[in-house]
Image (cartoon, rainbow, N blue to C red):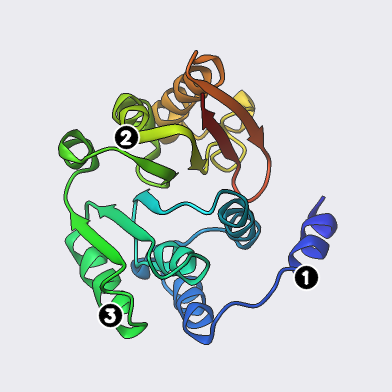
Amino acid sequence: MDNEKEYIRSLLPRRSAFLEELRRKSSLTESYAPIVAPDTEQFIVTLLALKKPRRVLEVGTAVGYSSILMADNLPPDSEIITVERYKKHAEIAVDNIFKVGYESRIRVIEGEAAEVLSWLDGDFDFIFLDAAKAQYIEFLPELLRLLNSGGILLSDNVLFHGMTGDDGSVVRRKITIVKRLRMYLEAVTNHPLLTTTLIPIGDGVALSVKK
């Protein structure tokens, strides 16, 4: 399986020098915040090419890598709103977005996602969920309100290092997160407004389309 993953990743296209540098920094220090897995990243780019969203919501900005990636692969008149709870990460993200000249296209909102989602306006074509995993289930009602019919909700890290689908690998301090992720996956795979499939790329993604 590891050889298969390495082969797939060897075929992935290179990103801009700026994004490559952000990925390098992320690999060197945990304090810089983790970023999306390379194969998940390419999946996002493919979905954007298919959907061509005009309005995108990201929950979990980190240092702005995914927002910049999406802006790189969307037309100039698209809008990206991204929410980040940690002040330090939000400040780094704003600086990175400014450096690539996307400050008019990407809006960073610092705050708790549950609160921010409650007052945001709807009509998003694409939502990328990559925040606190234990809170995914809490976010779901507002995400459904904000997502257009036919819109895509992509939830990252749903397999959570293999723990979500394997009781034997669950670390004790992560039990609550795993339980809540399982609740979320049960909800999105059985929700009457969603068609969902789980895909084992990166750390696992749930791809949901609103009916």
Report crowding for label 1: few under 14, some 14 to 19, many 20 or more residues within 10 A (C-alpha).
Answer: few
Residue at disc 3, secondary structure: helix
Q: Check disc 2 and report the residue beneath it.
A: 146
- Residue at 64% x, 56% y: name it: 46
Q: Is 177 left, or right, of 19 in this rendering? A: left
Residue 193 x/y as whole percent: 47, 18
Q: Which amino acid type corresponds to the residue marked 3 in the rendered image?
A: Phe
Earlier sequence position, callout 1 versus callout 3: 1
Earlier sequence position, callout 3 versus callout 2: 3
Residue 187 x/y as whole percent: 47, 18
Q: Which amino acid type corresponds to the residue marked 2 in the rendered image?
A: Leu
Measure the C-alpha gap from mark 1 to mark 3: 30 Å
Q: How many marks?
A: 3
Residue 184 x/y as whole percent: 45, 24
Earlier sequence position, callout 1 versus callout 2: 1
Task: Tell whether label 3 touches label 1 (CB within 8 Å).
Answer: no
Measure the C-alpha gap from mark 1 to mark 2: 36 Å
Residue 147 location, quadrant: top left
Measure the C-alpha gap from mark 3 to mark 2: 27 Å
Report crowding for label 2: few under 14, some 14 to 19, many 20 or more residues within 10 A (C-alpha).
Answer: many
Q: Which amino acid type corresponds to the residue marked 1 in the rendered image?
A: Ser
Q: Check disc 3 and report the residue beneath it.
A: 98
Residue at disc 2, secondary structure: helix
Q: Nearer the viewer, mark 1 or mark 2?
A: 2
Task: Tell whether label 2 touches label 1 (CB within 8 Å).
Answer: no
Q: Nearer the viewer, mark 1 or mark 3?
A: 3
- Residue at 36% x, 70% y: name it: 32
Report crowding for label 3: few under 14, some 14 to 19, many 20 or more residues within 10 A (C-alpha).
Answer: few
Q: Nearer the viewer, mark 3 or mark 2?
A: 2
Q: Which mark is residue 10?
A: 1
Residue 181 x/y as whole percent: 46, 28
Front-most of residues 102 and 6:
102
